[in-house]
Amino acid sequence: MSYAYLFKYIIIGDTGVGKSCLLLQFTDKRFQPVHDLTIGVEFGARMITIDGKQIKLQIWDTAGQEAFRSITRSYYRGAAGALLVYDITRRETFNHLTTWLEDARQHSNSNMVIMLIGNKSDLESRREVKKEEGEAFAREHGLVFMETSAKTAANVEEAFINTAREIYEKIQEGVFDINNEANGIKIGPQHSPTNPSLPGTGGQGGSQGGGCC
Amino acid sequence: METSDSECFESADEEIYAENENKKSKKVAGSPPSKEIPCETEHISYLKTEETKNERTNILDSNLQVDEDKPTKIGLSNTNEPEVITDNNTSNIQEEDEVNMWDEDEDWEPVETKTEIKPSESPPLTINRIWGWDLSAMLNAATVGVTAVTTQVSQGLSNVLETGIGAPDPAELARRTTQEEHTHDAEITEPSTNSSTNLFGFGNLVSGVTQITKLVETTGNKVILGGLDTLETIGKKTMQVLQEGDPGLKKKRALLKIEGEKPVLSHILREAKEKAELENRLLEEQHFARKANYESLFDDHQGLVHLEALEMLSKQCSIKLERLIESQSGRELVELQETMNQIVELCELVDDDDELEDASEIKEKLDTAVSEMVINISYDKVLTTRKEAEQWLDNLHLGVCSELELHEQAIDTLAQLTALAVERYHKIGELLLIKEHRSTADEADSLVQVTTILTALIGNMATKFSNKLSEKLSDSTHKDHINTLITNVYFESANSTSYLKNAFQLLIPVLQVGAI
């Protein structure tokens, strides 16, 4: 599949908050109640359209286990977006956010768009973290916030797509140097002119990039 | 009302009179009158229909006052109008009158010129107007407006006869109009004794009516023609200016590339068509190429991203080792470097030509090899994919499957197996890094075995596909094409092997990190 841009995402957060389930819901539109523990990093990819442009999201779903922390840190480099996930039914996952955020900021580029996600919003009865708390944390740290449910798929699409939109806007603003792959953005291969939504995109993207720099 | 109007337009009258004189003199020069008269002036006088009505009357009046013969002249000039002539008798009579008039008048010269020019050209407007005026004046006097005239015309000739019968000679009438305005009505109704005059008058009246309608028509025409004339004049002048010092506008044409424009359009269209065709062809080729493109298939099976992640992992380990080496010195450094080199030596692959035939045998060998690493890793996915490909080949009907499809399947299988294998290398790396008790030598040995098995497995798969393609060779007309495909399968098989070897090489720093 041809695309105008490829954005690298990382999903980070404590183990069991539902990172892999969010990815599965986004890529396969299904929910798996029991998920194997992620080893190191797993991948998912999906094509989305922003501003008429095909964008491939390449999602690096990292292991939340403490043991893999040093490994997963090495994967942060070159991510354009990050989904920082906590579980609204487990306060400790919310409490660890600062550590995760520090890690992410330290090992990735400063322009990385970070989306804070309070997952498992379907489990309202077991809620331990108020929505307002999440909002406040996001506001304080300059993050985008959203409560999602990988089970019901509520806000899952939005979380991934809104992040992509932010990245896209940053490209338009010239914040991201798309020619530097360390920023987590790759320009797509030459597009086939048959796809009506694509013909100009590659060229346009290129020219915009040129303008940005 | 009339009188006051006449007074009001006295000054205007003078102008128009002067204008008429001007026209006359121009006509004497022998140029066509319609062309000679400036369009603008004509327009103005036509547009001012209502005003001019009165003006004309005055012109006539003044003329008549000066010279008694002028009205006759007017009558004459009108009779020469081809459209005006509705009756043969009338024209005959008119001719007679003409002759008489010629004899009678000395001061006739300008009109003479007019009569000479007129037939060849459109009727001079001045005359039309004058005649129109004459009639209007009469009709006005009879309290019949232009609207009435139009109505009359539309009502038919009978009506005209009814109202117009017994109308005196317009010339005479005109003269009388000035003399006794108030008794006009009576004069009109006064029966004419001269039948010929009566007929003439009638003819004139009819022609007058026609003239009015014609006046309206010509006004429209003149406006258009006048507009066109103006445009023509502008156009001529423009061309004149443009052509100054550039005859034939050659320079300007060259500048504007007017000459080259025509062939370029067809050229552009042809080029566009050719371009579109080429694009379509390229697209089709791309489509097929992509379908059997190893790299893109490898990417589709997530081989590339795992390789990328493995590279990152490897790099991280290398950085760690470099730091360690930098911090060491003397004997410790030498020992460390020795250990590092030993590990590299352990990882050297030996060419093993073991034939892998049985699926269970492969699985057994792999399991044994992997177990040495003491990590929870399985090659089930790789083995399943291999098995599926084998089944596909077994169920293949060569008659149905084209060589291209077969080739496509071969490349896809190789890419998928390689991607899965690379993914395994990546996983091994991650698992080894979190392993608590490392046994570098065993790990290296295990990885050598695994790599050997996997490369053999892929080579075996490529051979199977190639054999199938070779079977097609016997009953095919494009042997060259099939041979190319077979070569390609072997080429991509070698490519797969190098991917695996590369992945294995990337694991060396991971193994080294475990040794320190």
Image: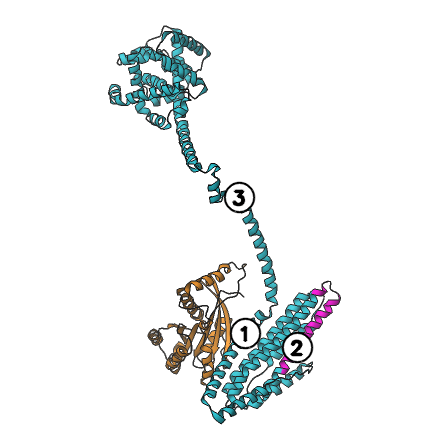
Mark 3 lies on residue: B262
User: Which numbered disc, 3 or 1, marks the residue that appears first in the sequence?
Assistant: 3
Toward the top, the furthest residue is B193
| First to last magenta residue range | B452-480
User: Which numbered disc, 2 or 3, marks the residue that appears first in the sequence?
Assistant: 3
Real-space CA distance between mark 3 and mark 1, rounded to the nearest whole angstrom: 53 Å
Mark 1 lies on residue: B304
Number of marks in the rendered image:
3
Badge 1: residue crowd in 10 Å (few <14, some 14–19, many ≥20): many
Real-space CA distance between mark 1 and mark 2, rounded to the nearest whole angstrom: 20 Å
Instruction: Give the image location of residue B393, x and y in percent.
Output: 68, 72
Amino acid type of the residue that numbered disc 1 sits on in the rendered structure: Leu
Chain (orange): A
Q: Are marks 2 and 3 in contact (CB under 8 Å)?
A: no
| Letter of the chain that mark 3 sits on in the rendering | B
Q: Which label number is shown at residue B459? A: 2
Q: Are marks 2 and 3 on the same chain?
A: yes
Toward the right, the furthest residue is B474
